Image (cartoon, helix red, strand yellow):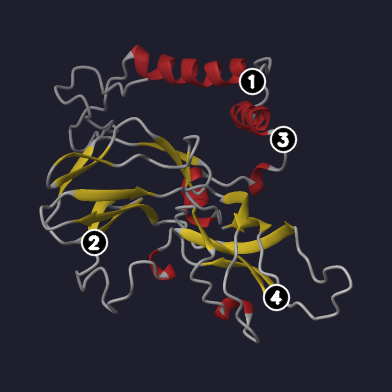
């Protein structure tokens, strides 16, 4: 529906005015559409809700709106409904990229340039759909960048050496840079001396889960250390490339030998899964005697 200005007004947005007899001012002349069209609009809502129109009930528009909301949401007290603006500010849900792997697929179309492609959908706060438009950014040689998205600024390329972005000079893998509800870490960009970019696209899902089983061969045994303190330089490192550092857990292990035949010697075993960063976990299998391999099952959640 469009606004119908007073009849004869040159301004399509002219207001209606009352007659002022002492001031010799005529009141606005009302075109028929100004009366008819609002009624038609209101009746369209009432009809859509399946409510029989009645001149004796002046709450039918309210009833119709509530009925349509109830039909779309499954019902409930409308006073508890959350509008989109409030939902985007309150729902504690991480960004969810609607691709199979949770990545947006940033590329480098040419030397010195990275591109966020068009046409990828993701959910902000689990409810508001955003579709990417092509965004190109220039890079410099020997730099480390993050591609990020926020509701206010959209996509941006952030230089880790920029004190405005990284005032504490934190390491690139620090959890302070992980995706949060309103600030999505999309990719890591590392350029070489020729300004050629190596891109690590990161997975963004409301819940990030990945699991696996690693066949871990002989590793040097480390005694009397906490699980997080094991160096295990020959442990099995697995790339996960999450946008948030996960919690890594052990799900199982096989082929563990604590005694062979009549051998009474004690054999200590370390079986550990470590969360190294948002990019990697490590599966560790160590045995103090009769070194051999085994399977380590793991799961990473963020």
Q: Residue at x 72, y 40 (%)?
A: 76
Judged by depth in the image, the label closer to the viewer, 4 or 3, is 4
- Separation of disc 2 and disc 3 at Cα? 50 Å
Q: Secondary structure at mark 2?
A: strand
- Separation of disc 1 and disc 2 at Cα? 56 Å
Q: Look at mark 1 in the image and give the residue it sits on.
A: 49
Q: Residues within 10 Å of mark 3 (few under 14, many from 20)?
A: few
Residue 144: mark: 2
- Separation of disc 4 and disc 3 at Cα? 65 Å
Q: Look at mark 3 in the image and give the residue it sits on.
A: 75
Judged by depth in the image, the label closer to the viewer, 2 or 4, is 4
- Separation of disc 2 and disc 4 at Cα? 44 Å
Count the marks.
4
Residue, far front: 262
- Separation of disc 1 and disc 3 at Cα? 14 Å
Q: Residue at x 16, y 49 (%)?
A: 196
Q: Residues within 10 Å of mark 2 (few under 14, many from 20)?
A: some
Q: Look at mark 4 in the image and give the residue it sits on.
A: 289
User: Residue 179 occupies which quadrant of the picture?
Assistant: bottom left
218 above or below 107? below
- Separation of disc 1 and disc 4 at Cα? 76 Å
Residue 75 location, x and y as percent? 72, 35
Classify the position of the C terminus by image quarter: bottom right
* Earlier sequence position, callout 1 versus callout 3: 1
Q: Are marks 1 and 2 in contact (CB under 8 Å)?
A: no
* Earlier sequence position, callout 1 versus callout 4: 1
* Earlier sequence position, callout 1 versus callout 2: 1
């Amino acid at each position: 529906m469009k606004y119908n200005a007073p009849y004869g007004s040159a301004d399509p947005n002219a207001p209606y005015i009352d007659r002022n007899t002492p001031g010799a001012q005529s009141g606005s002349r009302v075109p028929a559409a100004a009366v008819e069209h609002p009624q038609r609009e209101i009746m369209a809502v009432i009809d859509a809700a399946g409510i029989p129109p009645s001149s004796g009930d002046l709450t039918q528009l309210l009833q119709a709106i509530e009925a349509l909301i109830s039909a779309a949401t499954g019902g409930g007290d409308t006073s508890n409904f959350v509008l989109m603006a409030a939902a985007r500010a309150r729902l504690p849900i991480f960004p969810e990229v609607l691709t199979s792997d949770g990545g947006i697929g940033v590329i480098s179309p040419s030397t010195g340039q990275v591109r966020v492609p068009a046409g990828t959908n993701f959910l902000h706060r689990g409810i508001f759909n955003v579709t990417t438009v092509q965004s190109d950014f220039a890079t410099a040689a020997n730099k480390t960048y993050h591609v990020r998205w926020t509701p206010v600024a959209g996509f941006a390329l952030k230089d880790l050496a920029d004190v405005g972005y990284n005032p504490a000079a934190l390491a690139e893998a620090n959890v302070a840079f992980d995706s949060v509800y309103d600030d999505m870490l999309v990719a890591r960009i590392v350029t070489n001396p020729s300004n050629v970019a190596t891109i690590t696209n990161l997975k963004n899902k409301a819940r990030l889960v990945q699991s696996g089983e690693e066949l871990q061969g002989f590793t040097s045994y480390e005694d009397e250390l906490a699980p997080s303190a094991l160096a295990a330089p020959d442990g099995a490192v697995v790339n996960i490339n999450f946008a948030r550092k996960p919690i890594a857990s052990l799900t199982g292990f096989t082929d563990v030998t604590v005694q062979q035949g009549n051998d009474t010697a004690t054999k200590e075993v370390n079986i550990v899964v470590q969360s190294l960063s948002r990019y990697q976990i490590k599966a560790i299998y160590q045995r103090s005697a009769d070194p051999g391999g085994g399977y380590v099952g793991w799961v990473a959640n963020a």
